[in-house]
Image (spheres, helix red, strand yellow):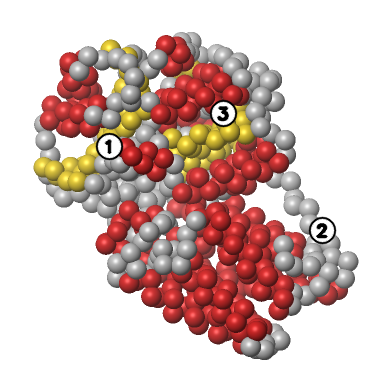
Amino acid sequence: MTKICGDAENFATSALRGFASIYRDIVQPVRGGVVRSKPGKQGKVALVVGGGSGHFPAFNGYVGEGFADAAVAGDVFASPSTQAILRIAREAHLGGGVILGYGNYAGDVLNFSIAAERLRAEGIDTRMIATTDDIASAPASEETRRRGTAGDLPVFKIIGAAAEAGLSLDRVEAIGRRANAQTRSFGVAFDGCTLPGEKEKLFSVPRGRVALGLGVHGEQGIDELDLMRPAELAAILCDRLLREAPANGGSRITALLNGLGSTKYEELFVLWEAIIPHLENAGYTVIAPLAGEYITSLDMAGCSLTLTWLDEELETLWRAPVDSAALRRDKMTGGYDESLPALSEAPAAYMKSLTEAGRQGGRCVASVMIKLSTALTEAEPALGQIDAHAGDGDHGQGMARGAAAAAKAARAAVAAGSGPATVLAAAADAWADRAGGTSGALWGAGLFAFSTAFDDGAVPDAQSLSLGLRRAMEKITGLGKAKRGDKTLMDALEPLVEGFETGLRQGFSIAKAWNQAAEASTLAAEATKDLLPRLGRARTHGERSKGHPDAGAISMALCARVVAREFSEKAVK
């Protein structure tokens, strides 16, 4: 367990504040991340990087001159929310466009993609670069499915240097994509990591063994061997990476030997002594290599090796001066600001409904959100246990956090006299912002789509509920690409939508139609235990997830039953 934890719920936020206090000469805190204390020149491209917490110095430690302009930090191992990305990208924008850099994980892809779409709609030219360096996560024929791991550092460092040099957005993007395409990583673990506040590790490696191909979120490895001497481990790391050398990559590379959290620097140095002969004997010249902790996984014991093949331009940018918490070359510049700015948040502006019927509708929506929050808070431990069989065990926490934030926002909107569309839209954004990760993005986007079917001047009726539910499903399907049978929340959502529509066509009341649909949703969710996952985080667990239902489907069905009880108690017709 984490020995210095405090309130596990606020572990990531507390760590961010402590980091910003120590490195106040380089960064200043904003809600959900950090920006440079001294912004770059007006007109330069802004690089905004981000991902889950638990990986320090990624990603907050990457902010500084010659590197990133800002970083967005989600909860531990969870993607930052769309809203946090938007806030910080707007703050970091200097007029030259924005590049969003993140690892290729489902939650990050969703939230950064939605944020990019909204930034472009605001007139900010925004490009996205998802790192795909981890060769263990997908075969070479499917490079776009690979995860981003320690390759984040060289790729983002090169992008940051190109932006600092004043290159155009198109040039910086092209350089970043080239750097990513020429970067490969492979990792091993000697023991698993522990989430803050938890007593058990996400996974364990048997004593005297080493797991190959570990991910930085505690994902299981692809193989396991007996613990070996440094020379043998160096050979495995180098050989696997060099077999995947990019075509026409050349003979000049940089290398990053990265510790995952509990592996000591001296151990890395011993391993490096065994690695460098392999690289040189293979005909490579190693330029400015690094060894240390650059993207960790809490207290995981292990390491990874990253190689980036350098052409002349990439080498120049890799060598360029940098001043960040993670990496410093040349003399540090900039003053030291004694004051730490207080975080502030402007109160949300809600539209007041012009009719009493609209305000009543808003109260109805808020009542449902409050009941959902209560139910999901009570179900948090059970949902976490279900998710642990095919994920990282954080689904219950994310759902409880999201629903609680949604209920709070709904209350505030009702207090302002808002109608149902405004109340649900406010709840949707709050849910996505607080929950984070894949589920947070999908639920937030789905609820927001649901809200577009409501009229702020009227109480929701059967037609608007049916239309909203259908829009929510279509939005979630469009973003997540999942369908029924993939062992995701869609296995519970589709029966809910179809069951409700069928009930209404048969002339049932809203309450009866929804109750019938919720029963079908619950049966379908429970039946996911017999499915093999085809999408989502459980996909990589394959047969190991069989026999256990999908946490997303179970929580969806739970929410459907909560709404059903609300409709029945109020005898909604």
* Residue 265 locus on image (x, y percent): 27, 27
Q: Which mark is residue 523?
A: none
| Label pair 3/1, CB-CB below 8 angstroms | no
Q: Pointer 1: residues within 10 angstroms few (<14), some, or many (20+)?
A: many
Which quadrant is home to the C terminus? bottom right
- For label 2, the residue is 351
* Residue 461 locus on image (x, y percent): 74, 77
The disc, 3 or 1, on the residue closer to the chain's N-terminal end is: 3
The residue under the point 61% across, 64% down is: 472
The disc, 1 or 2, on the residue closer to the chain's N-terminal end is: 1
Q: 3 left or right of 177?
A: left
In this view, the residue farthest toward the right is 354
Q: Is residue 44 above or below residue 101?
A: above
Looking at the rendering, which quadrant does residue 70 occupy?
top right
- For label 1, the residue is 187
| Residue at mark 2 to residue at mark 3: CA–CA distance | 34 Å
The residue under the point 34% across, 71% down is: 529
Say which of marks 2 and 3 sits in front: 3
**Is residue 562 visible in this depiction of the protein?**
no
- For label 3, the residue is 47
| Label pair 2/3, CB-CB below 8 angstroms | no
Q: Pointer 3: residues within 10 angstroms few (<14), some, or many (20+)?
A: many
Q: Amino acid at mark 3?
A: Leu
Q: Is residue 253 above or below residue 296?
A: above
